[in-house]
Amino acid sequence: MIVAAQGIRSRPLRSLLVVLTLAVGVLAVIGVYASSSVAEHTVRARAELQSGRAPTYTAILEPTQLGTIVSRTPAPGVAVTSDLPVRLGDGARDRPALQLTSVHGDLRSIRPLNVISGQWLDGQYPSGYAIHLVVNMQAAALITASSPTGLLRVTPPSRAVPVTVVGIVDDGGELPTAYARWEETAGWFPDVSHSAGTLWMHTTLQTVTRITTLAELDTWLPLRAERTDQTEAMSASVNSLRFIFTVIAGVAPVVASVAVLNIGLATVNERVDELALRRALGATRPSLVLLMLTESLILGIVASLTAVLAAIPLLTPAARLLFPELPADQHITFPATGTLLAIATGLIASGLGGLAPALRASAIPISRVMRA
């Protein structure tokens, strides 16, 4: 180790070039690993917003079934939603349209809607003569343009209803949507109670059967709950992309190894007399191979740590730039697996690049120092 450190210190420019070359290759691997991890989290988060956490089952409810369900206290992991198209303002056709979703149960335990501002429909908001809405970002833009004061009127064809917005969420949808508690909307909009709904269940099929039995819905047809979460399908797509990007990123360490090989061979040519003298003084061929490989591995460790230290402050801004749909409250941390992967990549690249120069150094004849 001491002799290897002396050899590195005696040639600072070449050592610096090796470190920079390896660091670039390691950074490429870290970038692909971190990007694939963030992409997987982003895709999974969007899928959970739209279709629920895994495993989530849904069933379409007829109006009579809908009324029976909402008359009972919802079980944990169960929620009911019913959609109704409405318009802002006076209800004219030229007014902005949005979807009013009535919620019974804890929908956020199934679909983790991200609260951007305000609060969710948890009953903690001030009571008043108005329906309390939580809107998604698309609906918030319409509401801001229609009613800058935050108080507006949702108007279906039948009546005008005062509402107030208590929160804004990211629900992963593209349509303007407003969410309200079933208890508030059912009294104002009779159409809600007489329309079809969706039963959301974040549970297992066995529990679905038990819930049906406990609800005493013997008059129902057999509950046809289908698994609708897209988490597994999305993860499979991300894994395929990760494999492709991993293959592409693998080119960077190979190029770095070739660069280390070229620098190492040039260094051996300059150190021929030194290495021949060591052989004449009793150094064995394996010891020379070990010496040269130790120098390469030390430089590989330094390059790996340099790449990790450079990647940590760049991770969050790069992720936000590449994945603008990443939830704003998501805290991005550098994974420990990425650190181990970076160090392993640096060591493998430096070891492969330094192997040929090490073997060449061990083959230098002792007679070389005698001719010198």
Image (cartoon, grey):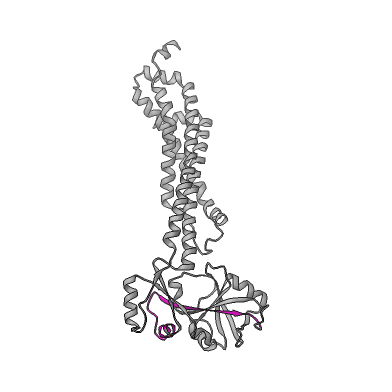
Which of the two residues, 239 or 163, is positioned nearer the viewer here? Answer: 239
Q: Is residue 306 above or below residue 159?
A: above
Q: Tell which residue pokes out farthest to the front in this image.
A: 221
The residue stretch that appears in magenta: 65-89
Residue 230 visible here: yes
Residue 148 visible here: no
Which of the two residues, 177 or 217, is positioned nearer the viewer here? Answer: 217
Q: Residue at x 52, y 52 (%)?
A: 315
Please state, as top left, top right, bottom left or bottom right, where the N terminus lies in the image: top left
Q: Please provide percent x and percent y for residue 194.
A: 49, 85
Q: Is residue 363 above or below residue 209?
A: above
Left of 5 or right of it: where is 21?
right
Q: Please provide percent x and percent y for residue 283.
A: 35, 22
Q: Residue at x 42, y 14 (%)?
A: 368
Q: Is residue 189 above or below residue 224?
A: below
Count of marks placed on residues: 0
Q: Residue at x 46, y 69 (%)?
A: 112
Q: Is residue 333 above or below residue 174?
A: above
Q: Please provide percent x and percent y for residue 159.
A: 60, 88
Left of 367 or right of it: where is 92?
right
Q: Quadrant of residue 364?
A: top left
Magenta stretch: residue 29 in it?
Answer: no
Q: Quadrant of residue 169?
A: bottom right
Left of 324 or right of it: where is 371?
left
Which of the two residues, 305 or 101, is positioned nearer the viewer here? Answer: 101
Q: Quadrant of residue 280?
A: top left
Magenta stretch: residue 82 in it?
Answer: yes
Q: Please provide percent x and percent y for residue 238.
A: 46, 54
